[in-house]
Image: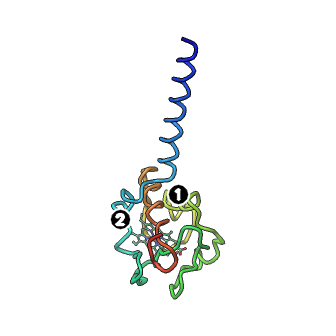
Amino acid sequence: MVKSGIWGAGLGLALLAIGSSAQAAGDPAAGEKVFARCAACHKVGSDAKAGFGPVLNGVVGAKAASSPGYAYSPAMKAAKLVWTPATLDKYLTGPAKMVPGTKMAFPGVPDAKDRANVIAYLGRFNAKGQKK
Ligand code: HEC
């Protein structure tokens, strides 16, 4: 009786841990669909070119405003940010709130899960646009 109770609680915790870590890491396949909202301005992949926005290859782990050949706003250049999943999450919640003066004219992604998923999708591309 006592044993099965402990076993049950342990299993519950283990499932909880799996569930929450999967959500925190995001789902790249679902993120590819979210990226449709970004694709008017941003490209990823080995043949990606800057458009209205910079190429986002290798952006997870990169310094802000470091995509070669793109004319960033003075605000983004001065932001001195490193794009981690946490800073990206904050930026994508409200770009102009985090970086006032950014020229990314985009209201943000309101849903936390959508943000985690699109960040996971971006995390798949290295700086050359190859999928990891
Ligand atoms: C209307 C066009 C537009 C849309 C839509 C858009 N962006 Fe942007 N984004 C920009 C521009 C322009 C910049 C450059 C900002 C600056 O220099 O201030 C930028 C910058 C960024 C940066 C910083 C890049 C760097 O090199 O520092 C990230 C990350 C980013 N966008 C992610 C996204 C994601 C993810 C989406 C979709 C959820 C998205 N953007 C949607 C135009 C857009």
For ligand 1, tell me if the residue under mark 2 lies within 8 Å. Answer: yes
Colour scheme employed for the rendering of this structure: rainbow
Number of labelled discs?
2
Residue bearing mark 1 = 89
Pinpoint residue 9: horizontal percent, then vertical percent: 54, 24
- Look at label 2 and name its amino acid: Arg
Compared across the picture, whether 72 is left or right of 82 comes to left
In the displayed orientation, state which residue is furthest to the top.
1
Pinpoint residue 108: horizontal percent, then vertical percent: 44, 60
Residue bearing mark 2 = 37
Pinpoint residue 83: horizontal percent, then vertical percent: 58, 66
What residue do we see at 33% from left, 61% from top?
A: 33
Q: Counting other residues with Cα less than 10 Å from the Cα at mark 2, is it few (<14), some (14-19), or many (20 or more)?
A: some
Cα–Cα gap, marks 1 and 2: 15 Å
Compared across the picture, whether 102 is left or right of 78 comes to left
Query: Is residue 50 shown above or below 8?
Result: below
Q: Quadrant of residue 98?
A: bottom right
